[in-house]
Image (spheres, rainbow, N blue to C red):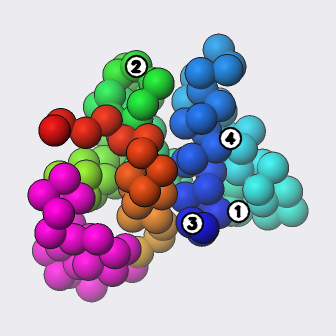
């Protein structure tokens, strides 16, 4: 199973078809359930931005492309990770993170967990 942020991405993507709220609102509801006693974990922006950036690009099944995420560096990381997964060249959190950050010493804060969880659960719109 994915970590909780990966799980949040899966639950949010699957629930989106059932609810009329925005992906951002659904994400907030889901992380509140997964992290009921940690407001800090509920507000963690990197995994949220990664998820919303994929939604914005129309890459999450069942969620139409739209303006969901503020400009952020996690968008580039998430979109590049999807390209690497499509190419089949990287398959783990660590290998994806090293590639999307060009090997810089930047701490990983669950962005790739979100991307991989959606990918492994067939919730990413694939080009091929």
| Depth check, front residue: 106 or 23 | 23
Q: Earlier in the sequence, mark 4 or mark 1?
A: 4
| Depth check, front residue: 17 or 43 | 17
Q: Earlier in the sequence, mark 3 or mark 1?
A: 3
**Residue 107 vertical placement versus 111 (above, below):** below
Q: Are marks 3 and 4 in contact (CB under 8 Å)?
A: no
Disc 4 to disc 2, how far (Cα)? 18 Å
Is label 3 in a helix, a strand or a loop?
loop
Is label 4 in a helix, a strand or a loop?
helix
Image location (x, y in percent) of residue 79: 24, 48
Query: Which residue corresponds to mark 1?
Result: 40
Residue at the spot 64% in from the left edge and 63% down from the top edge:
4
- Seen as rendered, the residue at the extreme top is 20
Tell me the quarter of the image containing the N terminus.
Answer: bottom right
Residue at the spot 26% in from the left edge and 78% down from the top edge:
95
Disc 2 to disc 1, how far (Cα)? 29 Å
Which numbered disc covers residue 2? 3
Query: Which residue corresponds to mark 4?
Result: 28
Query: Which residue corresponds to mark 2?
Result: 64
Disc 3 to disc 1, how far (Cα)? 20 Å
Magenta stretch?
84-107
Q: Nearer the viewer, mark 3 or mark 1?
A: 3
Image location (x, y in percent) of residue 73: 29, 54
């Amino acid at each position: 199973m994915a970590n909780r942020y990966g799980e949040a991405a899966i639950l949010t993507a699957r629930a989106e078809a059932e609810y009329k709220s925005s992906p951002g609102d659904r994400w907030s509801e889901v992380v509140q359930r997964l992290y009921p006693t940690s407001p800090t974990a509920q507000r963690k922006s990197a995994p949220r931005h990664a998820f919303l950036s994929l939604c914005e690009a129309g890459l999450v099944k069942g969620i139409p492309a739209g303006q969901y995420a503020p400009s952020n560096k996690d968008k580039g990381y998430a979109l590049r990770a999807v390209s690497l997964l499509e190419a089949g060249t990287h398959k783990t959190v660590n290998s994806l993170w090293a590639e999307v950050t060009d090997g810089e010493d930047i701490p990983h804060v669950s962005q790739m967990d979100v991307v991989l969880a959606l990918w492994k659960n067939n919730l990413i719109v694939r080009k091929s």
